[in-house]
Amino acid sequence: MIEAVNLSKSFENIKALDNINAGIKESSVFGLIGTNGAGKSTFLKILAGILKPESGTISIDGETVFENIKSKEKLFYISDDQYFFANTTGKELIKFYSAIYKDFDTKKCEKLLKALDLDLNRKVNTFSKGMKKQLCVALGVSAGTKYLLCDETFDGLDPVMRQVVKSLFAKEMEDRGLTPIIASHNLRELEDICDHVGILHKGGILLSKDVADMKLNIHKVQCVFAPDFTIDRLSSLDVMQVKNNGRVYTLTIKGDEEEVRGKIEGFNPVFYEMLGLSLEEIFISETEVCGYDIKKLIF
């Protein structure tokens, strides 16, 4: 498990991280969402042991990371701005990482690169941005680490390749319990893969929720009520958002599904239907309750 406690980091007068508290469970996908400058990359660099926290701690399986080789052996970090040795090839990178990570699977990496149609003997500096991201993902997955830190990894990948990478992560999770931590500025990009999502804003965690729990406790209901229905009757429900077009109401309601159904039916609606909520809609509703307009922050 990864745990951050009161984690802070500043660069001169800029507060990059401000008293962060977060827990990341094993064998799950954690999505870290935030705009540029929100602190995502700083958090991952501290987690990777590249930067030293100003205050607070961050630990992997109970051990701090900075200047701790044992902890660093458990993770592979894919930065947003990858660095490669001058004139290096894919084959040379495999040799380099296999010397660093004791469980690096050379055959798996070569197989992945071949499947991705990446030439092992071609110089990496001739690759496109998307090809470099694919190369890094293949190296990261093949390193055999417990945790994979991904900073804007899907940025630069085409839609098909994004699904390929997500499927690859899912397979590694099933086969060996890999835990990917994915930082992105786009919530929609992570909707179909994340088990837990946190929003980072101005260096602080604005919201951190388990996706399954959120989907169980927030519901979107479309209703048509009788002409004499008044909106104040909804006060018995924990209504987060109300939209209406004539007599058609679309309600976002927090609570147990059966309880919500019972109360809606008690209003004797002409028609009602429970609709599925996207992760984006859930987070918009949650953050608006907290006084933030997430649409301005992320989308």
Image: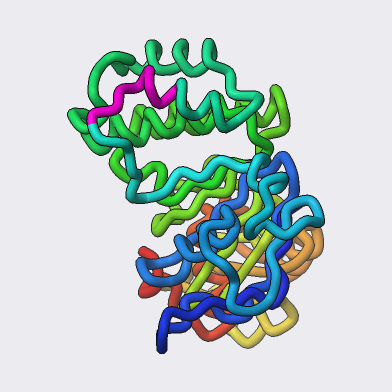
Q: Is residue 14 left or right of residue 193?
A: left
User: In the image shown, does 267 or 104 lie closer to the viewer?
Assistant: 104
Where on the picture, by quarter, is residue 49?
bottom right
Q: Residue at x 21, y 32 (%)?
A: 125
Q: Is residue 259 left or right of residue 134?
A: right
In the displayed structure, would residue 178 be above or below residue 79?
Answer: above
Where on the picture, by quarter, is residue 170?
top right
Q: Residue at x 74, y 50 (%)?
A: 25
* Camera sees residue 229: no
Q: Residue at x 72, y 32 (%)?
A: 177
The scheme the figure's colours follow is rainbow
Q: Residue at x 46, y 43 (%)?
A: 78
Percent coordinates x, y for residue 288 in the rendering: 52, 78
Dominant SS in magenta: helix
Q: Which residues are magenta?
A: 87-94
In the displayed structure, would residue 259 be above or below residue 16?
Answer: above
User: In the image shown, does 181 or 60 lie closer to the viewer?
Assistant: 60
Percent coordinates x, y for residue 33 in the rendering: 49, 61
**Outermost residue, left side:** 126
In the displayed structure, would residue 130 be above or below residue 70?
Answer: above
Q: How many marks?
A: 0
In the displayed structure, would residue 129 be above or below residue 172?
Answer: below
Percent coordinates x, y for residue 246 in the rendering: 41, 72
Magenta includes 91? yes
* Camera sees residue 142: yes
Percent coordinates x, y for residue 265 in the rendering: 73, 63
Where on the picture, by quarter, is residue 116?
top left
Magenta includes 56? no
Q: Which quarter shows the C terminus?
A: bottom left
User: In the image shown, does 248 or 160 lie closer to the viewer?
Assistant: 160
